[in-house]
Image: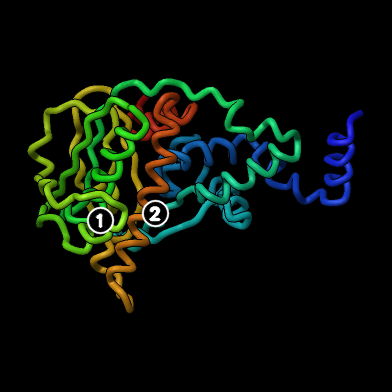
Amino acid sequence: MGNRARDSLKHIQENPQRLDVLKLLAHDIRWQLLTLLAESDLTVQELADAVAQPMNTVSYHLKLLRDNRLVSTRQSDADGRDVYYGMNISEVGIQYRLLGELLHPGMISAETVLKPEVPPFRVLFLCTHNSARSQMAEGFLRKLIVEQNVQAEVFSAGSEPRGVHPLAIRAMRARDIDISGQSSDLIENFVGESFDYVITVCDHVREVCPTFPGDYTQIHWSIPDPSTIEGVDDYEIFLRTSERILSRLHHFLAGVPTHIFRARELLSKLNNPSE
């Protein structure tokens, strides 16, 4: 046995809590829930329908995930009775990297990871006013696909478009991205077009999102409208919103080749409950 293996075993024996997350996610229901939340924010009812389990059972497992900071909750802007669950992307990533490093440093080495080729895709971002969140998402993704040499078409629209918000433009310029020339369009302008991904970044627009042709993945990110959040510095709120969107987009792009493992299959149960 090498020194590295001895050190790892000793560390586990002295710090058994390091394996708690692995034990937590070894449960089939919790793994399914996290798989779903890795792609889209969902309510308890939607999660229960997708995994075919009673709501009280799902709530119990969600509480365990939340207690370990792997998921978080946010009250819906559209209906205060609904609560959206979402995966804490950074925390889950940290926990998995720690576990991988504990097993062997090569498990987390970037050089050992074969990144699959991302196929061409079309994505549409939607929010109510198509003025901030969806515009920033469009701008970020347009830049990311160029940097990563990915072939994609990116659009955004809203149910009540009002033009691009000045503070959204300013926040994106701080990241060397100019979205001042992006248009603010009606969702109806895209009805009839085919997309691979339709991503709602607003709770309100999710309730009125139309159906698009073909086999596409519908994803929801429950992100507060920065223009309605009260704060000392409105610009800082837009900056924080842009950071949150960028984190989501990095996570999204990493999962495009495999559609986040089984998440597309599980999410299809929500869109086609009769199947």
Q: Residues within 10 Å of mark 1 (few under 14, many from 20)?
A: few
Residue designated by label 2: 244
Q: Which amino acid does label 2 sit on?
A: Arg
Most foreground residue, 110 or 246: 110
Q: Is residue 77 above or below residue 121?
A: below
User: What element does badge 1 sit on?
Assistant: helix
Q: In the displayed orientation, state which residue is furthest to the bottom.
A: 232
Residue 20, position as x, y percentages in the image: 73, 47
Q: Which amino acid does label 1 sit on?
A: Arg
Q: Work out how far the residue at label 2 is from the one at label 1, CA to CA, in angstroms.
A: 16 Å
**Residue 42, can we see it?**
no
User: What element does badge 2 sit on?
Assistant: helix
Residue designated by label 1: 173
Q: In which quarter of the image is residue 242?
A: bottom left
Would residue 75 appear left or right of 69 to someone viewing this image? left
Residue 15, position as x, y percentages in the image: 82, 51
Would residue 213 appear left or right of 72 to someone viewing this image? left
> What residue is rendered at 35% in x and 50% in y?
245
> What residue is rendered at 59% in x and 41% in y?
30
Residue 275, position as x, y percentages in the image: 37, 23
Say which label, 2 or 1, has the lower sequence index. 1
Q: Which mark is residue 36?
A: none
- Residues at discs 2 and 1 in contact (Cβ within 8 Å): no
Q: Is residue 127 above or below residue 268?
A: below
Q: In which quarter of the image is the N terminus?
A: top right
Colour theme? rainbow
> What residue is rendered at 33% in x and 79% in y?
232
